Amino acid sequence: MLVQLIRFFRGYVDFTANGKFPERFLNITSRYGINLWNAKPSKHSINASMYISDYRKIRLAAKKSSVKTRINAKHGLPFFVNKYKPRIGIPIGAVAGIILIIVLSNFIWSVSVTGEQTVSETKIKQVLSEHGVKTGGYKNNLDVDKIERDTMLEIDEIGWMSVNLTGNIASIEIKEKAKKPKLDKSTAPCNVKAKCDGVITNIKAKKGNVQVKKGSGVAKGDLLVSGIIETKMNTLQYVRANAEVYADVAYKKETSIKSEYEYTFLSGEKTYRNRAFLLWLEFPCSMSFSSYENSVFSETSQNVICNDTVLPLGIKTSTQSDLISVEKKLTKSEAEKIFMNDLLLCEAFEKPKSRVVSRKVTVSNANGEFHCQTDYIFNENIAITEEFSVTD
């Protein structure tokens, strides 16, 4: 195998030597130290192979032995290069491609994360990027064990993780910690009291002595369920009262907005700028100019995908969109719609566990503003626990 490689790089020819004394030709070449192989004699000729550098030296030997030589075939790298010498870009491109592949094989091309549920993938990639695990990161000096430990210390929700560097792909596998249920370990006796004023609509007592009835009104701090129970033996037992007490509760919300305001929207005019990227390198592909007074920017990226592998090669497109600002004057009907959307958000996020019993909305216009006053009645659980101490 080694001999074949040497012959390939040096280049050799298959030739025929014709004449009366081909045996003498072999003797003379041997005397001159010229090496040949695969010698096959025939009538008044001999076929053999020889390095191209030696073939140029056999003219004197051929003359002394009265033979004529003719090349039958050419083999090896020198002939290949000479063949494509008019197309010098082909061998240069091949060499450059091999060098580029060798260089790029030392970097991370893409990062994928699997197993995340509550933790943001963006957050995980951001922390890993700080430790060198990112697109374009040099992978040969990464301490995988240290990266795993540091990442789990920074993101407390991760209970286990594995960083796998396979070729140019970094695959991150994680398992999140199981959340422990919150247990009420307190054993001190307590009462259930009202956290606000209301009218009782339903009582679900699990433990304790109920002190109110359905339909009765209560004030904030009133006792709803007592933690003191009288037993059949006429003795007192102190327990931890537990109950859900639902009541209709009055709630008032006031908001206001200006009747005139500046409204900003996208005009539809856009300017696009494309950049080709390879790992961390970026090259502009277009020259676009704009004169927008106000604008917003967005960016999208399209990577080249090969065999389901996302390569760090593609096009980034930056979009600049024109913004126009105009003075807007609200009508009462428009203001009512805005207030109604605000109220729906309030009911969804401020009172997610409450049920709307009634809603009275009053909208007025004064001093260049629309004012909204909403009188609610919510049905909600008003029970809160309050511990008490027992002394003999």
Image (cartoon, grey):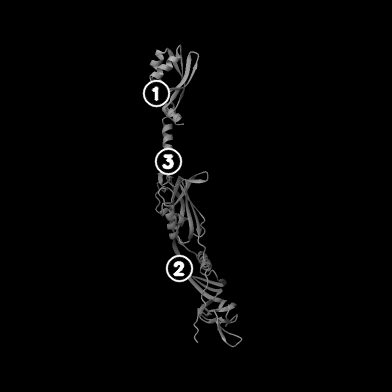
Determine which residue is flagged by label 3. 102
The residue identified by callout 2 is 369
Bin the neighbour count of mark 3 within 10 Å (Cα to Cα): few under 14, some 14-19, many 20 and up: few
Q: What's the residue at 41%, 19% (across, down)?
A: 30
Q: Do the residues labelled 2 and 3 touch (CB within 8 Å)?
A: no
Is residue 143 placed above or below 287 in the rendered structure?
Answer: below
Q: Which of marks 1 and 3 is nearer the N terminus?
A: 1
| Mark 2 or mark 1, whichever is nearer to me | 1
Figure label count = 3
Describe the element under mark 1 as helix, strand or loop: helix
Q: Distance between the residues labelled 2 and 3?
A: 68 Å
Find the distance from the CA under tag 1 to the CA under tag 3. Answer: 33 Å
Residue 41's label in the rendered image is none
Q: Residue 53 carries which label?
A: 1
Which of these two is toward me, 113 or 61? Answer: 61
- Residue at disc 2, secondary structure: strand
Mark 3 residue element: helix
Observer-nearest residue: 364 or 226? Answer: 226
In the image, residue 231 above or below residue 110:
below
Given the image, on which type of amino acid does mark 1 rest?
Ser
Location of residue 133 in the rendering, given as x and y in whole percent from the top left corner: 43, 51
Residue 72 is situated, as x and y percent measured from the top left of the image, at: 47, 20
